[in-house]
Amino acid sequence: MPSFGLPGRPGCSPGITRVTVVLPMSAGTLVCLGTEGGAVYFLTLPTLTLLEDKTLFPDEILQSVPDDYRCGKALGPVESIQEHPRDGSRLLIGYSRGLVVLWEQSTRVVQHLFLGNQQLESLAWEQSGKSIVSSHSDGGYMVWAVSGTGQRTQQPVMSTIPYGPFPCKAISKILWRTCESGNPFIIFSGGMPRASYGDRHCVSVLQGQSLATLDFTSRVIDFFTVQGAEVPEGGFENPRALVVLVEEELVAIDLQTPGWPTIPAPYLAPLHSSAITCSCHVSNVPLKLWERIVSVGEQQSPRQSSAAWPIDGGKNLAQEPTQRGLLLTGPSLGVMPCATAAGRMWGCSGGPTPQLYEGSQPPFTCPPHTQVGCFDPYSDDPRLGVQKIALCKYTAKMVVAGTAGQVLVMELSDEKSEHAVSVATVDLLQDREGFTWKGHDRLAPRNGPLHFAPGFQPSVLVQCVPPAAVTAVTLHSEWNLVAFGTSHGFGLFDYYRRNPVLARCTLHPNDSLAMEGPLSRVKSLKKSLRQSFRRIRKSRVSGKKRLNASSPSSKVQEANAQLAEQAGPPEVEMTPVQRRIEPRSADDSLSGVVRCLYFADTFLRDAAHHGPTMWAGTNSGSVFAYALEVPSQEKFSERAVEAVLGKEIQLMHRAPVVAIAVLDGRGNPLPEPYEVSRDLAKAPDMQGSHSMLISSEEQFKVFTLPKVSAKTKFKLTAHEGCRVRKVALVSLASASAGSEERLENCLACLTNLGDIHIFTVPSLRPQVHYGCIRKEDISGIASCVFTKHGQGFYLISPSEFERFSLSARNVTEPLCRLEVARLQDTSCLSNSLMATPKLPQANGTHVPRSPEGRHSPSDSDRSPEEHLAAFSPGPIDSPNSSLENPLDTTGDTTVEEVKDFLASSEEAERNLRNASEDEARPTGILIK
């Protein structure tokens, strides 16, 4: 990629070459750069070569300026450069002082001077080139007439301050668009009265006597109009739409419909309005549910305008997806969009979380202003943040858990309704003494019937006490049960009868930090770091003691080991040395945090009878198993669900339990609720003995049921020196055609180093190992979501997902073609710019090809199909795409992740220094 730095003038400050304006010329061969010092530079495209003979310095302009206008003052920075709409050789250059110059490039002559005295902000041409409009810092704009060569204009044709006479803010940008119906459109940003509306983000549309003030809820970045590509001489532009880019969203205004309404966006919620705090993927969505979600999504965005979204383009080259998947995301503002993940992101459905509580309505808007956009800056209560989501795709029931201990049971409705939401409270402390909650208060629910739009409508609100953030949630719609956990314990709720079934406190007596809420993260981090240093010192001291105590025998052992190495044959593989893992203290901070919850129909009490069970894993390595007495569907209203503690397991090293799963007699995962009863999955094997897979941060272990005896294990931390962050059971299919029945169930694991490991189940044999996410990317690792078919998502920004795949069959790479106007001569492009795309890794980043894989001149003659083949990956030996999370764990950043980040800071710096050498992005018509 070529780069260029402007040369400074001798004896001048380097700041005068700071670029203030960039204007690519319509011919596509030049770009104009205006600078802080008032000079204008011209560079060729795409080589960025400076044309010194075309450079325009302010001294040359001042020679044509009258003496009485100079007054010894500088022209100031270049504020705007505009190309003549009919003659590309003529440029309109505006300086901060107010002077506007019409410059002829070929003859280097000042054709016209507009002697303004008000500080200039922006310029715009009228389409015919006979007039210009300038906007200024006092909130006004002026219209100037363009006459013959050598003329000087001191007074504009018209000057007005639209929102005067009181002091107004500057008009930062202005546009002039002609219209066949008569009066032109004058569109500008800013210009509002300072005293009353100085803090508003507004764009005004003026046509004749009609004035609309579009009031946005976030800062205006830029705007433009959409009209025909070519306007004939003497014709009209007739803009169809106004597109405004603001800080949190993109808004389009219909300029051809009376009242200038907003054009519905292709999404329900602003994509960047709030950070994503959790996500959940649902694969193989039934067509009926799919169509219902699409339908209610259309109803949730009423069409005020019949115009279509004005931004379009590109061609999708990917095949139609064979599976329908939904990616549900929970942002920090409490309104949940869900997007399809079957090849492209579209469609939405929302959960009306904020409207259930008091104090979450925006203030009244003044009548002269039109509220535009769907971003709501007033739902900023952090307690509304969504922490966990669970969805049943067969009954359209969804559970949403939040930051303030609220758990909402919702159901999809095609019609709007008005009903009251039942509220239940579950005390997870169970009247424990000596604990006082010091965190945030619970949200106050609204009383009485509430109005709900079509979509997911809440029916039950379960409030955990204390109102700590929910760390785990799971739903079993066939049993009408929802389980939830916080840092204090877990609960089980029957949403059919609307009464709690179980509440269990998991706090350790010394776990006082759990009572202080999220504001005590600093104290928790300090205590954890202090304990880590104590472990290190303890390990060193114990190592020295062992060395000193056995110093005579250690020499003998060393000699014996050397003799054994010499005597052994060279081809014998030695057992890898395992790292020594220090057990965690029982009174570690936040040891009672519930990390995972799981429902299963399995053998818990004895080997002859199976039944419903619920499993819970905590941060201290404890696993609780409850046998559930669930009545038949005919007796749900007559009998209550009962829960009895069946097993309680404590892992030796007290490592946090990340996930729990039960395998049937064939070693396959148990099907989801309703899958067997609706003939959508094979019935699990209930003849052979079941197994339980417990994944902790340090190892994977398989136990037999119901005896809970260890069957096999793999110590990931001891072997690889990393910790488990995310796990899921995935089903991988063969890539060869006609191999529908060849499925292999595997365990996918993401570590704190960003690597993905694949293991067989239930034998836990390592299969493959991929690098996926940078180990410095803590938020990306914490947000990763696996899917049922070997794909995954992780956040690359607070609101953007990267997608990868572990499956040879379900490879996901977005393939499309964008046709744009190309330069006539591209011979100056270097080989690095036209390089062949690189092979994708698991995370969609690239690894360099060999030197033989460089671009050859014949590549430019390829057809689009050949380009598509060039962009497709080679042998599928690395992961790169994503879909379901049956064993999803908490997405919160843990103390261990912070430690990992601090420990790897030096390596992060080295990676950043080498990033520019390792990364070469391909260019072309295909976008991956």
Image: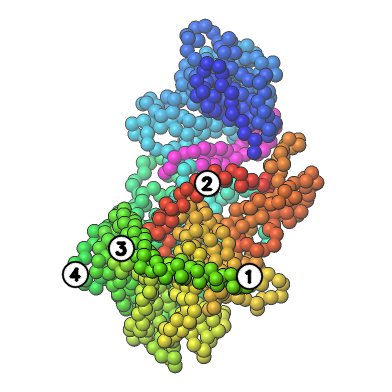
Earlier sequence position, callout 2 versus callout 4: 4
Q: How far apart are marks 4 and 3 (CA)?
A: 18 Å
The residue sitting at 28% across, 72% down in the picture is: 505
Check disc 4 and report the residue beneath it: 433
| Residue 589, label in figure | 3
Count neighbours of disc 3 (C-alpha within 10 A) and say few if under 14, some if 14 to 19, many if 20 or more. many
Alpha carbon distance from label 2 to label 1? 37 Å
Q: Point out residue 127 in the picture as x, y percentages from the top left corner.
A: 62, 29
* Quadrant of res 641: bottom left
Query: Which type of secondary structure does the marked residue at label 3 adopt?
Result: loop
Look at mark 1 in the image and give the residue it sits on.
570
Q: Residues within 10 Å of mark 4 (few under 14, many from 20)?
A: few
The residue drawn where x is 52% and y is 89% is: 688
Q: Distance between the residues labelled 1 and 4?
A: 64 Å
Q: Is residue 755 visible?
A: yes
Q: Give the SS element for disc 1.
A: loop
- 82 sits to left or right of 214: right
Precedes in sequence: disc 4 or disc 3: 4
Does the magenta segment cover residue 228?
Answer: yes
- For the residues marked 3 and 2, what is the alpha-carbon distance in whole angstroms? 34 Å
Give the foreground label among 1 and 3: 1
**Residue type at the position of mark 4:** Glu
* Residue in the image at 49% along x and 15% along y: 74
Q: How many marks overall? A: 4
Looking at marks 1 and 4 on the same chain, the residue that comes earlier in the sequence is marked by: 4
